[in-house]
Image (tube, coloured by chain):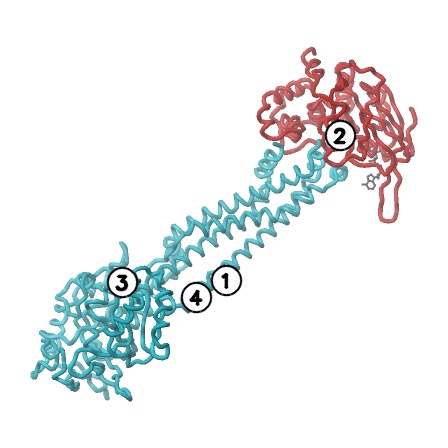
Chain colours: A red, B cyan
Amino acid sequence: MNDEATLLQTPRRSGPAFVRHQAQSPTIDGTGHEPQNSTVLSARGLHKSYRKGTHTIPVLRGVDISLRHGEFLAIIGQSGSGKSTLLHLLATLDQPDEGEIHFDGHRIDNLPAAGRDTLRNRYFGMIFQFYHLLPELTTLENVLAPLMIEQSWWKYLWQRRTHEKAARELLELVGLEHRLRHRPRELSGGEMQRAAVARALITRPRVLFADEPTGNLDAATGAGILRLLRTLNRQHGVTIVMVTHDLAVAERADRVVRLVEGKMTSA
Amino acid sequence: MYKFLLCWRYLRTRHIALASVISVTLGVATMIVVNAVMSGFVHEMQDRIHGILSDVVFESHSLDGFADPQWHMEQIERVAGEYIAGMTPTVHVPAMLNFPLPNGQFITKQVNLLGIEEATHAAVSDFSQYLQHPENRRELKFELRESGYDVFDHQGGEDALERVEMRYAGWQHRRAMAEMRAATGPVATQPGFVPPTDNSSFSPNTESDPFHDMPNSPAAEENVFDPARETHPGAILGIALGNYRDRDGQERFLILPGDDVTITYPTAGTPPRVQSFSFTVVDYYESKMSEYDAGFVFVPLKMLQRLRGMLIPGTDVGRVSAIQIKLKDEAHGDLVRDLLRQEFDPAVYQVSTWRDKQGTLLAAVHMETTILNILLFLIICVAGFGILAIFFMIVVEKTRDIGILKSLGAPGSGVMSIFLGYGLSLGCVGSGAGMLLGLLFVAYINEIADLIGVVTGREVFDPSIYYFQKIPTIVEAFTVGWIVTGAIAIAVAASILPARRAARLRPVEALRYE
Ligand SMILES: Nc1ncnc2c1ncn2[C@@H]1O[C@H](COP(=O)(O)OP(=O)(O)OP(=O)(O)O)[C@@H](O)[C@H]1O
Ligand SMILES: [Mg+2]
């Protein structure tokens, strides 16, 4: 585990590019030097509703949430309560109708598209219920995809060996070292989800978002994935937000909040 | 990096898109073939036309021509001498050609009778290159040769058909025919047909007759004309006047060099009278322009001038219909034409370049090429819409992947360039394959035409209908380049809309898409 630990704990880069004055900040992911109570991500008064013709369906009605560094937070709620919607807002995949989201003390919900793209690419990792691997790429290439997106092609090719080494080590960490050249359709659900976890971690994100990571897996496989997330959180200090409708799953987290009728209540 | 990778993977896994590109391939191939054949045709045809027409033709509006060609040539020399390589006077007049067949029937054809100067005509056009006797190609003479006429078409290349009868052409044929006629008596003629003149009805002004001491001149002999030892004045016939193709495609000859023909022509007087005169065929002219090969008869200029009464009495200076001008550089044609038009009264003289003369024909071919190109380009555009449709399908199919890429932080422009790059590579593949296919088709076009002919039982390219033995082709790198670039541009243009749509997909919607 020592190797993997250093892999995940190596200071990767100075602060977010979109926040210049933070460039020299020592707040680096997963180092554990940061006080546990510093807030990484926070949202205030989030509103989101979907419009169907003249009809508007309010989904979120003033959600307040804050995530501390190194925390493993679970959000539970019934199906259709808006958990995915909330997660997408937090991960800047979508924009709220009202309210603000702050990351490292900077407002991110109103950033221009390019800024949000960079944010997702470098500082956030995402895991989905349906794995969402790219079917045309091999497992290894899927894991490398965020780096390919981040870097220009010549820079990527220049550093290819380093990148591939990192990806192999991550795939080893999630237990997929024997599936490097397989296409997603040749993998089982659990394997695909583990590949997705490796992909989410390749850029050493500050926050890992997981939307029902076990929702599509049998109990044993799901438990394996949860154990993996748990390990990542405990041993490598990865900050995790997980969405689930399953209380048993949520119980693996440090803290559980409940989304009811578009508002947060502590569980 | 992901753009190249995904683009490449899509290219390898989406075969439906390759199918959509087949129409581009076919369009490009057809365009290349059509252009190659068309420019081959134009080039070959220009060659042939140019082979008979000199660069610039200076002619009179009247069949009677103009007097004193020497003075005219001096004037022309004075005006545009620096551009001119050579000049020769000619006389042309519509005429009738009439000759007997072995079965006693007579054949009459309408021809253009041309009087040309043996010494200078070869210098202004490729005329002599189209003759069938090698000696005549070297130095033109209106005399019957003993033998040695080409049996194989010297322009036909390796697989030229054998013209069996041409083996006997020449004096040998003439003597044999004379013997045969002597043995069987005069050939039977159709009832009511007045036998052709034996030139004795022609009453030339003997004193001014430049031919009166020629051995074959009718004026030189009082006694009976002996066809076994003498000939009439020589005439060169367009080859299509004397041959035909039998059912096996074999070329057969109705008359050969050595046979006599009668030519009926209008005189130069007012009003013109009609006269006939016998000539001996001394060679065939084959330009492969069927229009010329089936229409021209060449005789010596002085002879024609004398027969038509164009000579000034007591001299051998006569009127001519035209002066053919050969330029040092063919590109100066228009310039010389304009210079001469300024100098000479357009009411009397007409000056034109060989392009002007065949303008309608060339313009028609040009027009055809343009229209075909437009139509084929439209076909490629249709193929473009096929690509558009299939790309939209692929974008819809890839909606989820686009969402994934965006959730991983790929910008819209990156997603867009995946699909634009995809369109570009499809365009390159399609038009590259089309180019290869087209060039291969052009390279083997005659073999393909033969093969189709064998399969369907009908000759695709019948040399007796067209001007040429083989389908002529010219591949112009410039044209091919344009076609290929155009096709690629269309493929890229067709992928712009789907690519933009992909770029604008909102990541959440794309991710929810299942
Ligand atoms: N694009 C959309 N247009 C209209 N309504 C939508 C849209 N997306 C989501 N909704 C609605 O918003 C509500 C919340 O959806 P969301 O996916 O966030 O629920 P969820 O809590 O993640 O449910 P689950 O546990 O089943 O994943 C649902 O009622 C859904 O129908
Ligand atoms: Mg959900």
Which residue does the numbered mark 4 point to in the structure image?
A: B363
Name the outermost residue toward the top.
A2
Q: Which residue is mark 2?
A: A128
Q: Is residue B381 above or below residue A127?
A: below
As rendered, which of B413 and A88 lies closer to the eye? B413
Mark 4 CB within 8 Å of ligand 1: no
Q: Residues within 10 Å of mark 3 (few under 14, many from 20)?
A: some
On the same chain, marks 4 and 1? The answer is yes
Q: Residue furthest front?
A: B78
Q: Write the residue at 24% across / 62% down.
A: B129
What kind of element bears circle 1? helix
Q: In this figure, which residue is indicated by the disc labeled 3?
A: B85
Residue A33 vs A78, above or below: the answer is above
**Mark 1 sits on what residue?**
B371
- The kind of residue on which mark 1 rests is Ile
Q: Do marks 4 and 2 both belong to one polypeptide chain?
A: no
User: Relative to residue B335, is residue A99 drawn left or right?
Assistant: right
The reply to whether residue B458 is visible in this rendering is yes
What's the distance in space between the residues labelled 3 and 4, CA to CA? 28 Å
Q: Give x and y (percent) for residue B40.
A: 38, 57
Query: Disc 3 residue type?
Result: Ala
Q: Label 4 amino acid?
A: Ala
As shown in the figure, which amino acid type bears the numbered disc 2? Phe
Q: Chain of mark 3?
A: B
Q: Residue at x 89, y 39 (%)?
A: A58
> Mark 1 Cα within 10 Å, few/some/many (few <14, many 20+)?
few
Report the Cα–Cα distance between label 3 and label 1: 38 Å
Quadrant where the N terminus of chain A lies? top right
